[in-house]
Amino acid sequence: MLYLATITFTPENKAAFFKRERELMKKGLSEPPKGIKSINTWSSLKGRKLTALLEVDQPGALMELTDTWDDVADIDYDPVIPTADLPKLEFYKRKYSAAK
């Protein structure tokens, strides 16, 4: 399943967040936990937020990912689907069907 992760950090935690990221990269531990594949990541131009599209086959891995960062950032996860797939959902069909 796809999740959109929004990672927000305060100005005082920003340096700690990126320091930890660099340290994990040096140790070869910068990849997400097993069960999560990062599709893409975007940075806000304000520098206080990252957004990542994650493919998750083990939801418990989200807990592990959060545990790694929760002292320096807030992470929110929202399950998402491509907009083109909305018409395939039963709710969407019932609510927006042209057959009404």
Image (tube, rainbow, N blue to C red):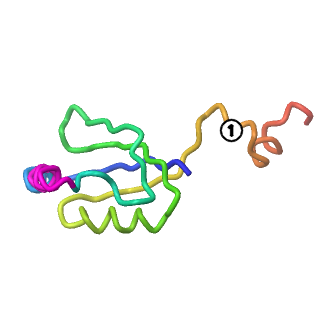
Measuring from the top left, give residue 71's x and y in whole percent: 19, 67
Of 22 and 79, nearer the camera is 22
Task: Kindly give the residue lying farthest to the right in the view shown.
Answer: 99
- Residue 45 on the magenta span: no
For the record, the magenta segment spans: 18-28
Identify the image quadrant of residue 24. bottom left
What amino acid is found at the position of numbered circle 1 in the picture? Leu
Q: Residue 6 in the image: x percent, y percent?
A: 35, 49
- Disc 1, SS: helix
Q: Which residue does the numbered mark 1 point to in the structure image?
A: 86
Q: Residue at x 33, y 38 (%)?
A: 41
Q: With respect to residue 27, does 60 lie above or below? A: below
Q: For the C terminus, which image quadrant? A: top right
Q: In this view, does 29 lie to the left or right of 41?
A: left
* Left or right placement of residue 65 versus residue 57 in this view: left
> Quadrant location of residue 63?
bottom left
Image position of 32 with respect to 42: above or below = below
